[in-house]
Image: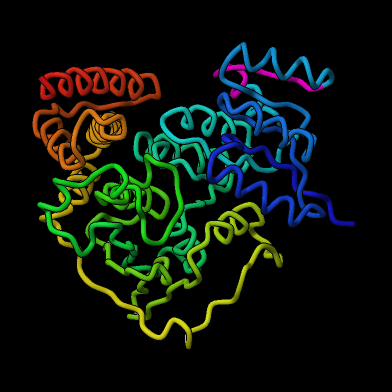
Amino acid sequence: MFDKKRITILGSTGSIGTQALEVVEKLKDKFEIISLTAGNNVELLKSQIRKFHPKSVCVSSVEAQTELHAEFKDLEVLVGDSGLEQICSNRDNDLIVVAVSGKIGLKPTLTAIKNKIDVALANKETLVMAGDIVMAEVRRHGVNLIPIDSEHCAIHQCIKNPHDVSKLIITASGGPFLKKSTEDMKRATIEQALAHPRWKMGKKITVDSATLMNKGLEVIEAHHLFGMNYDDIDVVIHPQSIVHSAIEYVDGSVIAQLGLPSMHIPIQYAVSYPERFEGIKSKSFSFIEAKTLDFEPVDFKKFKLLNIAYEAGKVGYSAPVCMNAANEEAVFAFLNGKIKLYNIVEIVDEFMSKHSIIKVDCVDDIFNLDFEIRTKTKEFIEKIRC
């Protein structure tokens, strides 16, 4: 008899989290939900609790905890970082899906790994900020770290023997400004930046896709996940988002993973790994309907943040932490109408050019530096607004 895989989803009310639960619902004979965590979207979490019957949940405030306790008397309702730590320490889990955004995903991911629980990772900051630390723990504890990002999921599916791989080829749609000029980007509105032509995602990641910082973060992730040198990781513009990424083997063979743009596919691959099941699939990919697949080089002058990310990754140590913190605060400022889109590029460039590289040996060092850079970025933003 098949035992259900027991899963916890961190960030169950977000874009990736809700789609992960759609996969679980479709394959309910394969999976069991152990725990769910969310911020303060209590109403959506309530509906998820009724449908999936988790044994515990975690929310970010005491007010949300109290509200859930009132309706679900027998449910364990935890709160805050300590609640996340407790949930990720529960060895009843076979897999923890890390679908939260931002630095909040780092400690729970490490907790799960140290408790020998496999992780399906959709959180970019975890590897960008602390890739060396995380991957060392993965090797030490012998767990699987399965990427959910469509690009890294594609590479994961293509690689059989990592030692035979000579190059990674990460594709990028180019976002809403692919055919626009730098001047168009400087005049861009929030609505234009959020109008991604291929993917429906959260606001922060959509803005990162508009500047191509998202691809820069993915390059750093790929370096850590697959142990490739940065000079052997290429980014190629592919507007159709059909080829999700590819690898080149030492003999010159190139293997690519193709499919329609749908996050359900990489999510299902990650939670089902190493097995495959028939799941959510609106239609099959057709080469005939696709007709043409276009590829072109990246304009690094227009998308300067991608080049900055490459350089930050190569330098290592504190450079990616600084870049990520400055970028994230700048993106939030843009979404709040405080700065223009291209100010994000200028702010990150400013902070990276003045950053003094230091060695970061532990998570506390990373969080302290992250806090320092965020504080200075906010102060800088207020100055340029005056």
Q: Where is residue 266 in the image (x, y as percent from the top left)?
A: 55, 58
| Residue at horizontal 76 percent and vertical 20 percent from the top | 76
Residue farthest along the bottom direction in this orientation: 288
Q: Which residue shows up at 51% across the image and 41% down it?
A: 138
Reply yes or no: does residue 32 show up in magenta.
no
Which segment is the magenta one?
75-85
Q: Is residue 317 visible?
A: no
Answer with the quarter of the image where residue 232 lies: bottom left
Point 24% across, 39% down: residue: 316
Left or right for 155, reference 63: left
Left or right: 24 in relation to 158: right
Residue lying furthest right in this view?
A: 1
Q: Which of 242 and 114 is in front in this view?
A: 242
Q: In this view, does 79 lie above or below 215?
A: above
The figure's colour scheme reads rainbow
Whether residue 374 is visible here, answered yes or no, is: yes
Q: Considering only vertical position in the picture, is 348 above or below 254? A: above
The quadrant of the picture occupied by the N terminus is bottom right
Residue 92 in the image, given as x and y percentages of width and height = 75, 34
Above or below 179: residue 325: above
Which residue is at the front of the view, 55 or 196?
Answer: 196
Q: How far across and how far down the image is residue 120, in percent?
A: 56, 46
Seen from the viewer's position, the closer of residues 152 and 284 is 284
Q: Examine the rendered structure and indicate whether residue 50 appears above or below residue 270.
A: above
Residue 249 placement (x, y as % from top left)? 37, 74
Quarter of the rendering occupied by the C terminus: top left
Which residue is pictured at 52% across the width and 31% down the height? 110
Residue 76 part of the magenta-drawn span: yes
